[in-house]
């Protein structure tokens, strides 16, 4: 299949589209700025309360008449441009494909040639997130602002989190032999105020910020290289595996409280209370991961120093590559007796992230900034997905679908479908489903190993359960058609082997609200497994909501990835800062009805995997699952990530 690298089939139409948008943009920008100035966020309200001479308020009073005059003057040009723009949309392609050509030896072609479908198996990591990258005036309705700056910062954080080394931490003590925190997170190195690294107690299960000596965010090329997982057949030197030994007598080291004042545990101070939450954070911040102060070797030396050594790795700090990796699966089951996989709240996106599915990337300029940042790590990207104008029976679409996909592996086929049953404000966006087929390997017999990924964003209005159920039906039907049309295999002569089938996105319903019972019982959940779900209306105890209470986004307690992570690990913190199902009881907002709240919040962002249609000799199992706080202050959703281990059944026997 030929992938579309431009939105129009020829340069003439592209030039006409550029002219039409040049006529529209001044009016669009002025209207957006004018509306945004009258929709303050809670952050701006606090600044006004703290500073009577707040500059932004003065600018609003001074520039509003100017904006109005310019808006009126630009309307005739915008109308002419709109007529030309809407006419061109019938020839527009449903997405734009971008590939970074100079990825070098670590590119997607090299990645998919590594796995031959044999050996102990291969793990693949998926993540999904709703970014709320709307025009600034609309984004403010969700209490976030500065869309263009947020897009750049989000891209930097995702890239830096995914490209850091994959650090595995094992506890070596007479009383605790467990693996500490999921391996797709980083090592915690709490520091005191004097900057001295402290030992990590074996009881810590949270994955927090690390003094990672990674690439600087501005170094695009270096950030494109990611370490491989030694368990996947790559070099063991690609991952940092640290063994933490207990003190004499079998006691783990004493825990050191983090610095006061909400400072990040890597020793860098959190931003001041008055700092703009959407601007790029300084070097050393836990979100941006820009600190060059440590390396993988220094992590081991710090541990050796905590044991009383001189900085040279001692017997307890040697890297136990083979023995620790071999015990990995058994250790996990002992640590989590209720699950066969690790689960956690993580301050980072998973290391060695393979596939990224995003929603609400509506703003085209923000999508371009996000793409530029993510290309430092992902070679293949699809953006500007959706349709505009009038298409068939659909109503007029002012916004695209907001879907965005990034991959380290080559994309073979793509399909997009727009849901035709959107209603009210949701009908203005071309919400739909994006289907992708990626190549992840080749067998020794030259059979392609492929995977299927479906990304979607369902109808948002809470009272329209029937619309969401119809969209779930269409999602499954379109996926079946996509797999049938893109398959080149037959039962007698299989040319392709399917390794995984993943469905993810923002479903806009949860598994605990009584108003969402219809969606909770949908047949999608019988065909696909939800790692966080026990059954309709019943969540697993460790699962938490992914929708944040938007009024608390800029509170000091949750304004950094580390702080938000710490808050979400306590029941009281979840009740305070996660969104819960609406209560019909009178008596104020969420924070005033804590005693009425049930469960762990509204989990509306899903990551599902299916077993039907996979290679009969293979098995795909969840290896790790995490809720991610790295985008704190930048969006009102928690990203989620899942790592699947695909292994041959005959290897397990």
Image (cartoon, helix red, strand yellow):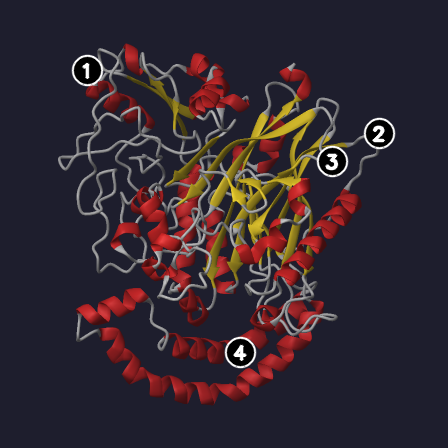
Q: Secondary structure at mark 2?
A: loop
Residue 24 numbered tag:
4
**Percent of width and height locating residue 408:** 55, 40
**Percent of width and height locating residue 614:** 71, 33
What whole-number distance in Å separates the C-alpha atoms at marks 3 and 1? 55 Å
Circle nearer the viewer, 3 or 2: 3
Specify the quadrant that holds the C terminus: top right
What whole-number distance in Å separates the C-alpha atoms at marks 3 and 2? 15 Å
Q: Secondary structure at mark 3?
A: loop
Residue 613 numbered tag:
3
Query: Label 2, on which residue?
Result: 493
Give the farthest residue toward the front: 585
Query: Label 1, on which residue?
Result: 309
The answer to the question of whether label 3 and label 2 lie on touching residues, with beta carbons closer than 8 A, is no
Q: Earlier in the sequence, mark 2 or mark 1?
A: 1
Circle nearer the viewer, 1 or 4: 1
What whole-number distance in Å separates the C-alpha atoms at marks 4 and 2? 54 Å
- Residue at image point 46% right, 41% down: 543
**Percent of width and height locating residue 433:** 65, 55
Q: Earlier in the sequence, mark 1 or mark 4?
A: 4
The answer to the question of whether label 4 and label 2 lie on touching residues, with beta carbons closer than 8 A, is no
Residue 552 to residue 408: above or below = below
Q: Residues within 10 Å of mark 2 (few under 14, many from 20)?
A: few
Circle nearer the viewer, 3 or 1: 3
Q: Quadrant of residue 164?
A: top left
Q: Secondary structure at mark 4?
A: helix
**531 or 191, which is in the foreground?**
531
Circle nearer the viewer, 3 or 4: 3
Q: Relative to residue 418, is residue 191 drawn left or right?
A: left
The answer to the question of whether label 2 and label 1 lie on touching residues, with beta carbons closer than 8 A, is no
């Amino acid at each position: 299949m030929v992938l579309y690298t431009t939105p129009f089939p020829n340069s003439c139409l592209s030039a006409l589209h550029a002219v039409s948008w040049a006529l529209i943009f001044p009016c669009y920008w002025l209207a957006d700025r004018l509306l945004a100035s009258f929709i303050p966020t809670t952050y701006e309200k606090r600044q006004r309360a703290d500073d009577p001479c707040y500059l932004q308020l003065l600018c609003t009073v001074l520039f509003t008449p100017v904006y109005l005059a310019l808006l009126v003057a630009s309307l005739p040009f915008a109308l002419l441009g709109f007529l030309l723009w809407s006419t061109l949309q019938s020839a527009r392609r449903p997405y734009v494909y971008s590939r970074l050509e100079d990825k070098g030896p670590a590119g997607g072609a090299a990645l998919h040639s590594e796995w031959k479908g044999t050996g102990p198996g291969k793990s693949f990591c998926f993540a999904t997130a709703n970014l709320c990258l709307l025009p600034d005036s609309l984004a403010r309705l969700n209490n976030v602002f500065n869309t263009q700056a947020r897009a750049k910062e989000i891209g930097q954080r995702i890239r830096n989190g995914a490209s850091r080394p994959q650090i595995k931490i094992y506890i070596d003590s007479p009383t605790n032999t467990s693996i500490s925190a999921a391996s797709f997170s980083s090592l915690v190195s709490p520091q005191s105020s004097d900057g001295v690294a402290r030992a990590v107690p074996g009881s810590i299960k949270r994955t927090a910020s690390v003094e990672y000596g990674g690439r600087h965010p501005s170094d695009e090329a270096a950030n494109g290289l990611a370490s491989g997982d030694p368990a996947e057949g790559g070099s063991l030197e690609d991952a940092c595996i640290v063994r933490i030994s207990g003190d004499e007598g079998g006691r783990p080291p004493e825990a050191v409280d983090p610095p006061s004042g909400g400072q990040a545990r890597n020793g860098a101070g959190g931003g001041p209370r008055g700092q703009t939450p959407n601007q790029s954070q300084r070097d050393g911040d836990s979100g941006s991961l820009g600190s060059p102060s440590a390396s993988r070797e220094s992590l081991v030396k710090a541990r050796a120093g905590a044991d009383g050594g001189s900085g040279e790795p001692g017997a307890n700090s040697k890297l136990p590559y083979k023995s620790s990796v071999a015990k990995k699966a058994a250790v996990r089951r002992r640590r989590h007796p209720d699950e066969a996989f690790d689960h956690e709240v993580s301050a980072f996106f998973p290391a060695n992230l393979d596939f990224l599915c995003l929603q609400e990337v509506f703003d085209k300029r923000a999508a371009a900034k996000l793409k530029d940042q993510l290309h430092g790590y992902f070679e293949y990207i699809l953006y500007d997905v959706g349709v505009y104008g009038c298409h068939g029976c659909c109503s007029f679409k002012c916004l695209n679908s907001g879907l965005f996909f990034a991959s380290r592996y080559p994309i073979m086929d793509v399909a997009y479908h727009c849901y035709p049953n959107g209603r009210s404000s949701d009908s203005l966006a071309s919400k739909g489903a994006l289907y992708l087929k990626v190549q992840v390997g080749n067998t020794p017999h030259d059979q392609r190993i492929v995977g299927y990924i479906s990304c979607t964003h369902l109808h948002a209005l809470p009272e329209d359960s029937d619309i969401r159920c119809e969209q779930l039906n269409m999602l499954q039907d379109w996926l079946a058609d996509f797999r049938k049309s893109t398959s080149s295999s037959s039962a007698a002569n299989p040319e392709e082997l399917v390794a995984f089938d993943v469905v993810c996105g923002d479903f806009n319903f949860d598994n605990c609200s009584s108003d969402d019972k219809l969606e909770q019982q949908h047949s999608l959940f019988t065909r696909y497994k939800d790692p966080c779900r026990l059954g309709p209306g019943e969540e697993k105890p460790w699962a938490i909501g992914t929708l944040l209470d938007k009024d608390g986004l800029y509170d000091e307690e949750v304004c950094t990835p580390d702080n938000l992570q710490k808050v979400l690990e306590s029941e009281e913190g979840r009740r305070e800062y996660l969104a819960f199902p609406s209560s019909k009881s009178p008596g104020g907002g969420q924070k005033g009805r804590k005693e009425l709240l049930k469960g762990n919040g509204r989990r509306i962002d899903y990551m599902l995997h299916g077993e039907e249609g996979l290679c009969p000799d293979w098995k795909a199992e969840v290896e790790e699952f995490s809720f991610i706080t790295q985008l704190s202050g930048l969006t009102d959703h928690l990203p989620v990530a899942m790592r699947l281990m695909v292994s041959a059944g005959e290897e397990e026997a």
